[in-house]
Amino acid sequence: MNPIVVVVHGGGASSISKDRKERVRQGILRAASVGYNILKQGGSAVDTVEGAVAVLEDDLDFNAGCGSVLNENGEVEMDASVMNGKDLSAGAVSAVRCIANPIKLARLVMDKTPHCFLTDQGAAKFAAANGVPTIPGQQLVTERSKRRLEKDKLEKDAQKADCEKNLGTVGAVAVDCQGNVAYATSTGGIVNKMLGRVGDTPCIGSGGYTDNDIGAVSMTGHGESILKVNLARLALFHVEQGKSLEEAADASLCHMKSKVKGVGGIIMVNKAGEWAVKWTSTSMPWAAAKDGKLHSGIDFGDTSITDLS
């Protein structure tokens, strides 16, 4: 029996207000606990990452699903991807509207089509054909996301180069009792983005990657920067070259910062049950469950460990 592990992240952040911090912490702990329970019951790594990410998509405090940020038209467009390290099967969707859980749609793309990636109207048609319920677009819009869009539009005139402003994504990586690894990543994108803008999240090799022989990784950060350096695959390349997970995460994040001044975060696991969490943004909510213990944190040096019930 392989050691079972799940690690989740709630996106990089420039700062998290005091009133949100505890809600964010509880959301991350809940997602990791749900994922760990799936693993304990013999569930697959893919089921685990899908389940954990769906919890965060349903939480208003994260930039995915019902908490997604708004594009320039004040609408929600979401991206997601999932991948199985056992056979490299993958599913992704982008520019998705009116669906509560894009990660579940990405899983259907992986399981029920010969393709890896569906977008916009094609993804909507596929969702309808597979009985995925639609919800009114406004149901995904929160008061917080409206305020963030208004603030961004006001600040556009002063356009300061702040790539830390838009780092919200959620993700999970896991290893199951069979030694299979998987990742899932989901996002609403960046505030005030152009209509149809797609970042790293649904792009296999950028927003995440997994291979049983190497490990699994899920990213968060400035999407355009992550895309330019293929950050997920780069991190696993460093593992292939003999680096530890922590060294690989550090090396790839440093590369992105030096080449394109991008910041972000990485969660990683391998089939041996090792895991790593690293970020260059100001903070990144994360949690990891292994051996009946729940590790979590938000800021640098802020790590707590509790027993899982």
Image (cartoon, rainbow, N blue to C red):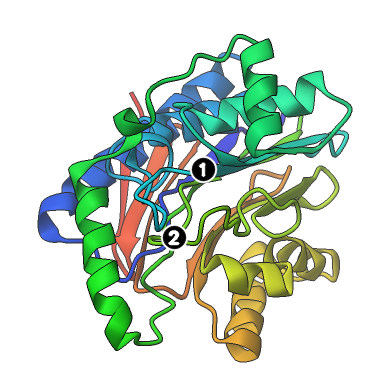
Q: Residue furthest top?
A: 131
**Quadrant location of the C terminus in the rendered image:** top left
Under circle 2, the secondary element is: loop
Viewer-nearest residue: 272 or 170? 170
| In the displayed structure image, the side of residue 83 where residue 198 appears, left or right | left
Crowd rating for badge 1 (residues with CA inside 10 Å; few <14, some 14–19, many 20+): many
* Residue linked to disc 2: 190
| Residue 69 tag number | none
Q: Quadrant of residue 223?
A: bottom right
Image x and y of residue 157, in percent:
29, 83
Q: Residue at x 34, y 45 (%)?
A: 62
Q: Residue at x 71, y 53 (%)?
A: 203
Image x and y of residue 17, in percent:
16, 61
| In the displayed structure image, the side of residue 260 where residue 301 appears, left or right | left
| In the displayed structure image, the side of residue 86 where residue 269 appears, left or right | left
Q: Residue furthest bottom?
A: 258
Image x and y of residue 256, in percent:
63, 80
Q: Residue at x 77, y 62 (%)?
A: 233
Q: Are marks 1 and 2 in contact (CB under 8 Å)?
A: no
First in sequence: mark 1 or mark 2?
1
* Residue linked to disc 1: 78
Compared to residue 136, the image places residue 220 above or below, namely below
Crowd rating for badge 2 (residues with CA inside 10 Å; few <14, some 14–19, many 20+): many
Q: Quadrant of residue 224?
A: bottom right
Q: Residue at x 74, y 27 (%)?
A: 109
Under mark 2, the amino acid is: Ile
Under mark 1, the amino acid is: Met
Image x and y of residue 172, in percent:
55, 42
Under circle 1, the secondary element is: strand
